[in-house]
Structures are given as structure tokens and as C-alpha cells.
């Protein structure tokens, strides 16, 4: 099931499928290891605050706007 | 010419610590030409050899999309570095090696990996076979724990050996899937016939074209012409359709896959990721409610520390300058010269310099929070609030620092990711009242609103801070347009910081403040001394300062203020607490605040005092802050900030005065 990262709940995991939106924002994510195929886990998500995700050993905070543009395949 | 060593690496990998270890205190902080990005340079001496070390901005990749990345990339691309030291966090190899691959892909051979934080990797249960790393990457690798000084000498040794041509490298570069590789060699063939091939690596140019890199497209277009370029872009569009997404994503994904296969040759990871103390801490510190509470707690302690330690030092410096003035004055017989030296230079510069302890301590406290890993968390907590005012979460840091002193606060905008965010934050920063303005506000509030002193002071602070936020909203909408960068920030591991790094960093920053005191502030102090002593001293009614005051009186009248306010405000530009000191001079009571309060109460009503305190808080930033804005953003923004604040203060002053008159009947 595909879902926007901003809609995922704390504790959920998934694989990034696509990153929509402008090249500027997208390329910043790529440098942080967030690309199609990356496994991520949602550490904290409490709207309207940023979403905190785990990417490998590192933690990244993403604003709601950009989290909205990341499409994830949810893993159960 | 000494050879140039460039330090590259992700943020938070210990690059600064390594830079300090290589250069010691032989370093210089400035800006990269034309932008608000900090440039650090230093000299490394080792075994009678000298190297120039340049610290490139910390970046995650080398795209053309951010100024920081473009600076780092162009520095390498133009061949400015004889040796590149790529600092890699060994506890986070996958992401760090992405930048390494971006560097190696440019076709450079003279790269050394400083594999830092090996202690942290070990603690996380990651085992690395260092011999195999070198073999897999094809370049020298130096395992390090820079904070403890481990590996520094090895790194220096390797730099010297590479400079002497004693190391042959065979850097690995990422290989992509068949379709991408075919397109790369297709474009490479076209580019090989152009002059570009002599200067740049054609494989790199080809890959960057595939990702639609704006800078490379511009560059190639110049040499190939529109027709051939269209041909290439048509191919790229077809490939994009095939993958159903832009190729920057495809290439990044494949690059990570390549790194993954590489890493497995030399690293074994623990099977299970354990929850760390950091994870526990984050549950509180980035929580929407507890996070906000702890943030207030942290910054309360920060200011408590800065003022408890700094204020006695400031007072001591103040009296030191006073005695110095007396001492020097005793040796000068010419009255004019004595006035210039004692009142003008020592008095004026001393007033600003006495803030040095506060500036330095603020930097120490902020660097500490930064290095320990807290600042990123503070930015997360503040993001939702700051974003409403067109500012990124991180801009909260300079806004808070400004309550101490605007000078370090303006310098701290360098930590923001985006040029627009930096300029905007810098412009509104002077509206956040600093500790010097606290002196004026508390004096006036105490003299006129005895029973409501705290309330009035807090009110003025609130109005001022509110105007800063509203200004950001308005300026962000109409003057410095643009979206601002999306909020993307890494939350680094919590670390015990290195005191040496913090002290060096704080010293480097506050040194700039001292330099300004010696130049622009000195000039300003002398100018104002001249205005107030010629042709006759202040008090005679004939001095240029008083004439200026009377000239501006029609304007200050609108705010219910006489010429004395105008004169005081002019002197307040040197340092804001001068506003009160000038009233003291004009009334001829010197430094006696008691006497001054009595006289001022006779001369003005509480409403006028309130307006005076408010206008003092809002109008033109002090000379040191203007100088800081000028060196961070250029003359243009320094002028704009000064004019904006002046107009704002005038308008608000007039409004509040008349509103007050209306309400009070």
C-alpha cells in the first residue's frame, strides 16, 4: 500500500517509492540517503510539526511540506 | 606557493576538529566571495613543510542546488586543491561515502579518506577492516578519532607523502546499470571533441547532464550549441520516461546500491539496532510539548550562565577602561587631544569592547549546544512556529542569541542552509532587543513606572520581538521573495563536545568583534566625539550634535520627544546604553542615575518615557551590529536594515505616542 510519508504513524516502516516535487528539495533528500528503495522508519510524527525518520543509522527531521512529497510503500 | 589541502565532508563528522588539529590557531575566518558562506583557511606546518588548508562547507552531496555545495564542488572542479581530505564518519558509512563517490566521480585522484569517529563505530558494534577499505576505495584511508587526537599524525604524514607523489591511487568510481552506462558513454563521446574535455572529466559532465544539473547544462550548452544539446536532452527525456522518474533519483539510488556492495567488502554490522540513550533523550527533546518546555529551560540556563559569568567581567572591563582613561588623561596636556583620546577613543571603543565577554560567552554556550547535538533538536521544536513567519526553524537560534547581543547573533546566521533565509534572519535580527537595550528599558521603566516596572519592560520586549517576526513575514513576502528552503535537517548523535574545538571556534568568531572594535567602531566613536565637542561642547547648545538634534526635533516632536532625545539617539548608535548616558551629560548629572531619574521625571510624562524606551529599542542597530551585517551580507543589506529599522521606529513611535495621548485623553 502506497502512502505519503506525512500520513504515516510513529513506529511504522516502509520503502521509499518516489519523491515528488522540485529538484531542489529532492536532491537534498538524495544526499541524505533518502532515495527510491531506501528503507525508512518513522520515529516521530505529530502534525503540524516535522516528521522524524530513521534512515540507516541516522535520524532526519523533515518538514510537513516535504514529507508530503515522499511516497512510501508501507511495510506491515 | 605552498600546496593546498581542501577538507571536504558531511556536516557533523568532526571536520572542524580535524581542521583545528591540522592548523592549530594559525587560521583565518572570512566569507567565500560574494556570499554569506563562511570560509575557513589555515596553515598546517609539519616537518618543515607548509600547507594551506581550506575548510570547504560541510555538505551531503555536490549538486548545483545549494550555494554551499556549489562552492565545495567548484573548488574541487577548478583544480584549486592539490590534495582533498574527505572526512568520513565511520559510524554512518553509507551516507558519508555518497559524498566520497560524488568527489571521486569528478575524476580527481589526489583524495585521502579521514575515517573519523572509529570509537563511535566500535561502540555501535560496527567492525571495519581498514586494510580492505583502502583496497576497495583505491585511495589512502586514515582511521581516526580526531577528538582524542588519534590519527592526526598519520593524516599529516599521508598528506605529505601524497604531496611528494609517493602515493599512487586508483580511485573507485560508481558503476551504473547498462542503460545509464550506455548513455554516459554516448554523451561522453560527443563531449570528447570539445575543449571541455581538456578541463573537466567527461564522464562526470555526462552524469551531471543526465541529472539535469543546471550549471553543467549551461556550461555544455556554451560549447556544443543548442542543436546538439537538444539532441542530448531528447535522449535524457526518453530515459526518464523509461524509468518513469527523473534520473537524479535513478542515479542516486544506483550510487547507494554501489556503495552498499562496496561497504560489504569491509564492514560487518550488528544484527539488531539497539535503542540508545540518544533515542530516549529525543523522546523528550523533540516532543511538541516537553520539547518546548525543555527548550525554554535550556535557553534560560544559557542566559543565566552568560550573564552570571559575563556581567561581572563586563563591569570590570568598564571600570578598567575608565581607569585607563584617567591614567592616560593624566599624561596629555592638550585639552583637545585629551578629550579625543579619553572620551572619544577610550570611552567610545571601551563602551563597545566591554561587551566582549558577553559575546564570547554567548558563542561558547551556543557552540556547546551545537556540538553536543542539541541545536538540531531546538530547530525541530521551533520549526512549526518560525515557519508561520517565513523563517526556518533554525533561524530561531540567532533570534534567541540576539537577546544577549546582536553581533554574534548576526554572525550565527551562517549556520542556516539557504541564502534567502540567512538574509531575512539577519535583517530582522536587530529588532530583537539585546542586553544593552535592556539597560535603557529597565532604567526608564524604573524611573517612570515604579510599580509596573517589570510589566512595562516585558511589554517593550514583546512589542519589539513581535515586530521582528511580523517584519520577517512582510519582508519575506515582498522584499526577499522565495519559498525558503524546505525543512530538512539531520539529527546528529549526541556527543560530548571537545572543549578545544568550542574555545577555538568561539575565539575565532569573537575575534571578528574585536577587529570591528578596532576599525569601524573606532571611527564611529571619534566621529561622535567630534560632533559633541565642536565647535563648543555639548551643554552649550552650540555643538554639532545639539544642532543635529534640533534639526531632527520636528520629527521627534511627533513622538513627543524634544531635541535631547534626538541627540541621545544619535549617540546611541555607538552602543545603545549611550542613550541614557547622553541624557546624563546634557542634564549635567554625569553618571548619577538617581539624579537623572528625578530630572527626567520633571521633563517628561510616563507616556513619553515609554515611547523613548520603545524607539531606542527599535531604531537603527548599533554600529557593531551594522558592521556585522555588512561583513555577513554586504553593504547593501546593512543600509537596508538600518533604514528599515529607522523608519519602523519612527512610525511606531509616532503611532504609540498618539494612541497613548488618545487613550489617556
Image: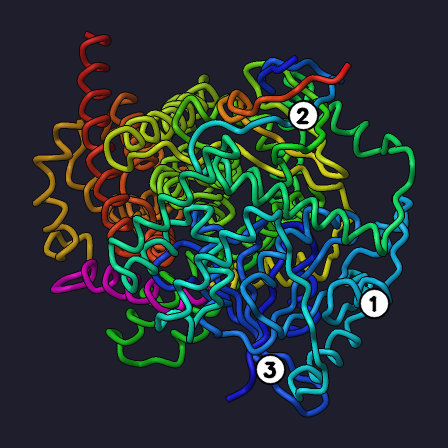
Span highlighted in magenta in the image:
B514-537
Q: Does residue B189 show up?
A: yes
Marks 1 and 2 on same chain: yes
Q: Are marks 1 and 2 in contact (CB under 8 Å)?
A: no
Residue at 48% x, 50% y: name it. Answer: B63
- Residue drawn at (75%, 74%) of the image: B155
Can you say whether B306 is above or below B611 in the image? below
Residue reaching furthest bottom? B48
Residue where numbered disc 1 is placed: B150
Q: Secondary structure at mark 2?
A: loop
Q: Which mark is residue B286?
A: 2
From the viewer's perspective, tell me whether residue B628 is left or right of residue B80: left
For marks 2 and 3, give the one nearer the viewer.
3
Camera-side residue of B433 and B83: B83
Q: Residue A29 placed where, x, y %?
A: 56, 37
Q: Secondary structure at mark 3?
A: strand
- Let me know if residue B314 appears in the view: no
Q: Chain of mark 3?
A: B
B419 and B225: which one is in front?
A: B225
Amino acid at each position: 500500500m502506497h502512502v505519503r510519508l506525512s500520513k504515516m504513524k510513529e513506529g511504522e516502516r516502509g520503502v521509499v517509492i518516489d519523491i515528488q516535487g522540485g529538484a531542489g528539495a529532492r536532491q537534498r533528500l538524495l544526499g541524505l540517503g533518502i532515495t527510491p528503495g531506501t528503507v525508512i522508519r518513522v520515529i516521530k510524527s505529530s502534525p503540524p510539526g516535522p516528521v522524524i525518520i530513521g534512515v540507516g543509522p541516522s535520524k532526519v527531521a523533515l518538514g510537513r511540506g516535504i514529507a508530503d512529497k515522499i511516497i512510501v510503500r508501507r511495510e506491515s | 606557493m605552498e600546496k593546498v589541502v581542501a577538507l571536504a565532508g558531511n556536516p557533523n563528522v568532526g571536520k572542524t576538529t580535524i581542521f583545528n588539529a591540522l592548523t592549530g590557531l594559525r587560521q583565518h575566518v572570512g566569507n567565500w566571495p560574494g556570499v554569506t558562506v563562511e570560509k575557513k583557511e589555515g596553515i598546517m606546518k609539519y616537518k618543515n613543510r607548509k600547507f594551506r588548508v581550506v575548510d570547504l562547507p560541510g555538505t551531503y552531496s555536490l549538486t548545483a542546488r545549494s550555494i554551499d555545495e556549489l562552492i565545495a564542488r567548484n573548488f574541487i572542479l577548478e583544480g584549486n586543491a592539490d590534495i582533498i581530505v574527505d572526512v568520513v564518519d565511520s559510524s554512518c558509512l553509507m551516507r558519508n561515502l555518497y559524498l566520497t563517490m560524488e568527489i571521486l566521480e569528478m575524476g580527481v585522484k589526489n583524495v585521502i579518506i579521514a575515517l573519523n569517529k572509529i570509537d563511535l563505530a566500535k561502540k555501535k558494534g560496527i567492525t571495519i577492516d581498514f586494510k580492505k577499505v583502502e583496497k576497495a576505495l583505491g585511495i589512502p584511508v586514515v582511521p581516526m578519532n580526531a577528538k582524542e587526537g588519534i590519527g592526526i599524525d598519520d593524516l599529516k604524514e599521508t598528506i605529505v607523502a601524497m604531496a611528494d607523489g609517493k602515493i599512487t591511487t586508483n580511485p573507485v568510481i560508481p558503476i551504473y546499470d547498462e542503460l545509464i552506462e550506455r548513455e554516459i558513454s554516448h554523451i561522453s563521446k560527443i563531449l570528447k571533441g570539445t575543449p571541455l574535455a581538456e578541463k573537466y572529466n567527461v564522464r562526470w559532465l555526462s552524469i551531471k547532464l543526465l541529472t539535469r544539473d543546471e550549471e553543467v547544462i549551461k556550461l555544455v550548452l556554451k560549447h556544443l550549441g543548442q542543436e546538439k544539446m537538444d539532441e542530448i536532452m531528447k535522449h535524457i527525456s526518453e530515459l526518464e520516461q523509461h524509468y518513469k522518474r527523473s534520473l537524479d533519483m535513478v542515479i542516486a539510488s544506483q550510487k547507494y546500491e554501489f556503495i552498499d556492495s562496496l561497504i560489504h567488502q569491509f564492514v560487518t554490522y550488528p544484527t539488531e539496532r539497539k535503542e540508545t540513550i540518544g533515542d530516549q533523550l529525543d523522546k523528550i527533546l523533540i516532543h511538541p510539548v516537553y520539547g518546548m518546555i525543555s527548550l525554554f529551560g535550556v535557553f534560560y540556563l544559557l542566559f543565566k550562565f552568560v550573564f552570571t559569568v559575563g556581567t561581572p567581567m563586563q563591569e570590570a572591563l568598564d571600570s578598567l577602561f575608565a581607569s585607563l582613561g584617567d591614567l592616560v588623561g593624566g599624561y596629555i596636556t592638550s585639552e583637545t587631544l585629551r578629550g579625543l583620546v579619553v572620551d572619544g577613543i577610550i570611552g567610545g571603543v571601551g563602551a563597545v569592547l566591554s561587551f566582549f565577554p558577553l559575546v564570547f560567552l554567548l558563542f561558547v554556550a551556543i557552540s556547546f549546544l551545537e556540538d553536543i547535538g542539541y541545536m538540531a533538536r531546538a530547530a525541530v521544536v521551533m520549526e512549526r512556529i518560525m515557519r508561520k513567519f517565513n523563517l526556518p526553524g533554525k533561524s530561531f537560534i540567532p533570534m534567541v542569541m540576539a537577546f544577549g547581543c546582536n553581533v554574534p547573533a548576526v554572525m550565527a546566521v551562517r549556520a542556516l542552509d539557504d541564502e534567502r533565509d540567512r538574509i531575512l534572519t539577519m535583517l530582522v535580527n536587530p529588532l530583537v532587543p539585546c542586553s544593552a537595550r535592556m539597560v535603557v528599558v529597565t532604567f526608564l521603566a524604573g524611573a517612570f513606572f515604579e510599580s509596573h516596572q517589570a510589566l512595562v519592560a516585558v511589554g517593550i520586549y514583546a512589542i519589539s520581538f513581535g515586530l521582528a517576526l511580523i517584519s520577517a513575514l512582510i519582508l519575506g513576502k515582498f522584499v526577499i521573495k522565495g519559498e525558503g528552503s524546505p525543512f530538512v535537517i539531520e539529527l546528529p548523535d549526541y556527543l560530548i563536545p571537545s572543549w578545544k574545538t568550542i574555545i577555538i571556534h568561539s575565539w575565532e568568531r569573537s575575534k571578528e568583534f574585536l577587529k570591528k572594535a578596532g576599525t569601524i567602531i573606532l571611527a564611529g566613536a571619534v566621529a561622535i566625539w567630534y560632533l559633541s565637542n565642536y565647535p563648543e561642547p555639548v551643554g552649550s547648545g552650540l555643538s554639532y550634535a545639539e544642532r543635529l538634534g534640533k534639526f531632527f526635533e520636528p520629527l521627534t516632536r511627533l513622538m513627543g520627544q524634544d531635541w535631547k532625545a534626538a541627540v541621545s539617539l544619535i549617540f546611541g548608535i555607538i552602543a545603545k546604553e549611550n542613550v541614557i548616558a547622553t541624557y546624563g551629560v546634557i542634564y549635567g548629572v554625569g553618571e548619577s542615575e538617581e539624579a537623572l531619574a528625578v530630572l527626567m521625571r520633571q521633563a517628561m510624562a510616563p507616556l513619553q518615557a515609554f515611547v523613548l524606551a520603545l524607539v531606542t529599542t527599535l531604531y537603527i542597530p548599533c554600529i557593531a551590529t551594522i558592521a556585522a551585517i555588512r561583513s555577513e551580507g554586504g553593504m547593501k543589506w546593512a543600509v537596508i536594515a538600518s533604514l528599515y529599522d529607522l523608519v519602523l521606529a519612527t512610525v511606531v513611535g509616532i503611532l504609540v505616542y498618539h494612541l497613548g495621548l488618545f487613550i489617556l485623553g
